[in-house]
Image: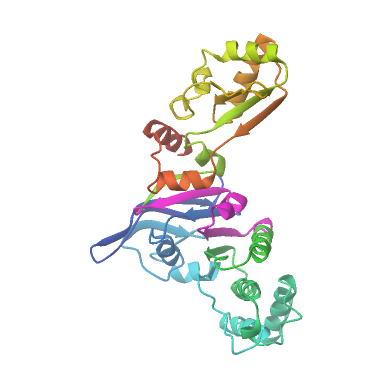
Amino acid sequence: MTDLAISARGLRKAYGDRTVLDGVDLAVPAGTVFALLGPNGAGKTTAVKILSTLVSADAGELRVGGYDLATDAHAVRAAIGVTGQFSAVDGLITGEENMLLMADLHHLSRREGRRVAAELLDRFDLTEAAKKPAATYSGGMKRRLDIAMTLVGGPRIIFLDEPTTGLDPRSRHTMWQIIRALVADGVTVFLTTQYLEEADQLADRIAVLHDGTIAAEGTAGELKRLVPGGHVRLRFTDPAAHRAARTALSSLGTLGTLGEETADAVGTEVTDSSDGTDLTLRVPGDGSQRSLRALFDRLDAAGAEAAEVTVHTPDLDDVFFALTGGAAVPRQTTTATREALR
């Protein structure tokens, strides 16, 4: 099994009579991006504060970087870096001075501190602005400087709490490139975000936090298969092929009846949405390799060749709304997927 950079079992935290985290379990493999999603007030920032030793947990077995948070918090702090929701940049001093201040806090020698600061400023494309007051930086530049400051101590685990909030699309994509580069260097990134596309683009695994518990966890693809609505659209140019396919698939019901465990979640019946000129069939399915193979086997057996095949799957927006108060996720599917992920 891959070494875990972060693990939590039974994490609990309450403020007065309000329970924020109620038995949360997390397992983050080293060298990956783990995204924690959830609505405002779900407890994402609280989880980050606990795992980064800023707030104590009420209960739970917690390890970060191989160290026990309860008994070796100092070693945890030496292994991590944290970029919070709000910038830690001091706008009254220059970008370089911000970096050197962090070097001093990490007890680097003057020479080593200047070397590290120069390397990171160059890496984050901030060298030209290094002598300017940080207050003159754009939002994207401040965020890059913020992460550069986080990296001064060479952490192998980084907590990024909504790092792209308020950034324009170009700056957000630049930040994504930075995160990918960090992971390529072996750094583990624990990311909280409200941008579902961001989690989809970056995260190796995603957990959705709701009402103090993990509502679901898995890869983006696994989470998308939790939500009904996925289907395969078959378009035909040959009316005979269209009729043969419709006959072959008419008894299919749901594509899951061909062997998928998620049969109850992937749809109802094959539908013919042809309008006389556009010959199309819509076949419910989760888009998995196994279900597609079963579909194509049926088409081949019927001698029906589609001119175009399009796979439609729910996106993370659908997953998010379903798990946090929108459309209900079928219980059977949720249970099966959770068991498969354990």
- Figure quadrant of residue 112: bottom right
Residue 207 falls inside the magenta stretch: yes
Q: Can you say which quadrant of the picture contains the N terminus? A: top right
Residue 119 drawn above or below residue 33: below
Of the 4 image quadrants, the one containing the C terminus is top left
Q: Is residue 168 above or below residue 272?
A: below
| Residue extending furthest toward the left | 17
> In the rendering, at what x and y percent does residue 306 appear?
70, 21
Instruction: Indicate whether 208 appears above or below 139.
Output: above
Q: Position of residue 262 (x, y in %)?
A: 47, 28
Q: Quadrant of residue 143?
A: bottom right
Q: Which residues are magenta?
A: 183-212
Q: Residue at x 63, y 63 (%)?
A: 172
The vertical placement of 230 against 16, above or below, is above
Give the residue at x 67% y 27%: 309
Q: How many marks?
A: 0
Please give left or right for residue 235 compared with residue 316 in the image.
right
Report the residue at 44% width, 55% height from top. 38
Q: Residue 201 colored magenta?
A: yes
Pinpoint residue 133: horizontal percent, then vertical percent.
65, 87
Q: Is residue 30 visible?
A: no
Q: Judge from the rendering whether residue 338 lies leftward or rightward of residue 258; answer left or right.
A: left
Q: Position of residue 310 (x, y in %)?
A: 65, 31
The foreground one among 143 and 40 is 40
